[in-house]
Image (cartoon, coloured by chain):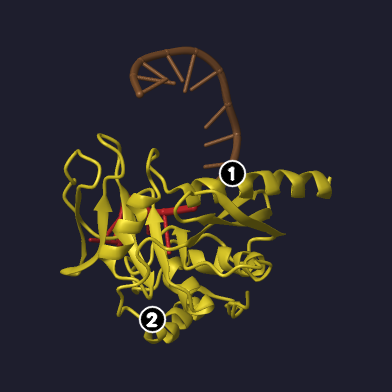
Chain colours: A yellow, B red, C brown
Amino acid sequence: MKVCSIAAPATAEEAEAIQDALRPRLDLTGPGPRDPALVAGVDVAYADDLLAAAVVVLDGTTLDVVEQVTAPGRPAFGYVPGLLAFRELPSLVEALERLTVTPDLIVCDGYGLAHPRRFGLACHLGVLTGLPTIGVGKTAFVGSFEPPGRDRGSWSDLLLDGQVVGRVLRTRDDVKPVFVSVGHRVDLETACHDVLALTPRHRLPETTRAADRLSRSALKAALAASA
DNA sequence: GCGACAG
DNA sequence: ATCTTGTCGC
């Protein structure tokens, strides 16, 4: 598939300006794909100054792997909270362009709208691909919230500056919840529905689990090749 | 001013 | 993210 490349800022100030410039391109209309036929998971693994980006496309119904691609590379930017996209997206875009199928939804590791400038990794990837995207974070980043109920499916608002920017969603009974926020062309209700469909037995979506495993094995291969 | 801070 | 043993539970 064709994906726009990501700008390569030299400083944090430049990176923030790029996020502010792209934010107006976000489509927050929704509702977006409910029970999408093809769902992609993306992730990046690191070791020293090497990294491996991975994309895994699953059948949304059976959760079987349909296609998977990787791209080795170097971190394009230091890790700065709020600017994660500039570190991971260059290699992720490269991997996505090797995809022969077009997913109906992309599930990102991290945040979307729940971001200091309302433009997290999931939003950025949505604008670059033009596809529906959502962010699923494992730990708190921005926003305040009350713990959701203990049952799977329970959730609470993630609030930032008095606005609802995401949901803290319980995907398994009595297990630490995940942080869901929309990226592009999906509403929060649909995003949470889709996350629950992707978590029939684990806390994290099958898409992120598959992409995580693939990125780690691709990283091992890259390390072996460079040695 | 100080601390916290997706991956 | 990554460095790391054993251990509890499905």
Asked where in the image residue A158 lies, by quadrant, the reply is bottom left
Asked if residue A44 is positioned above or below residue A115 in the image, the reply reads: above
Quarter of the image that includes the C terminus of chain A? top right
Q: Earlier in the sequence, mark 1 or mark 2?
A: 2
Image side of residue A150 versus residue A96, left or right: left
For image coordinates 36% across by 49% down, the residue present is: A139
Q: CA distance from mark 1 to mark 2?
A: 30 Å
For image coordinates 47% across by 47% down, the residue present is: A206
Mark 1 is surrounded, within 10 Å at the Cα level, by few (under 14), some (14 to 19) or many (20 or more) other residues, namely some
Image side of residue A42 versus residue A163, left or right: right
Q: Secondary structure at mark 1?
A: helix
- Give the residue type that dot 1 points to: Arg
The answer to whether the residue labelled 1 contacts the one labelled 2, judged by CB atoms less than 8 Å apart, is no
Give the residue number, with chain letter if any, for mark 2: A26
Asked where in the image residue A44 lies, by quadrant, the reply is bottom right
Label 1 in the same subunit as label 2:
yes
Q: Nearer the viewer, residue A195 or A11?
A: A195
Q: Give how far across and how far down residue A22 sits, in percent.
A: 44, 84
The answer for which chain carries disc 1 is: A
Q: Nearer the viewer, residue A78 or A106?
A: A106
Q: Which mark is residue A213?
A: 1
Q: Give how far across and how far down residue A74 sits, in percent.
A: 68, 60
Asked if residue A129 is positioned above or below residue A68 in the image, the reply reads: below
For image coordinates 16% across by 43% down, the residue present is: A149
The answer for which chain carries disc 2 is: A
Q: Secondary structure at mark 2?
A: loop
- Give the residue type that dot 2 points to: Leu
For image coordinates 53% across by 54% down, the residue present is: A58
- The answer, for residue A29, to whether it is visible in the render is yes
- The answer, for residue A140, to whether it is visible in the render is no
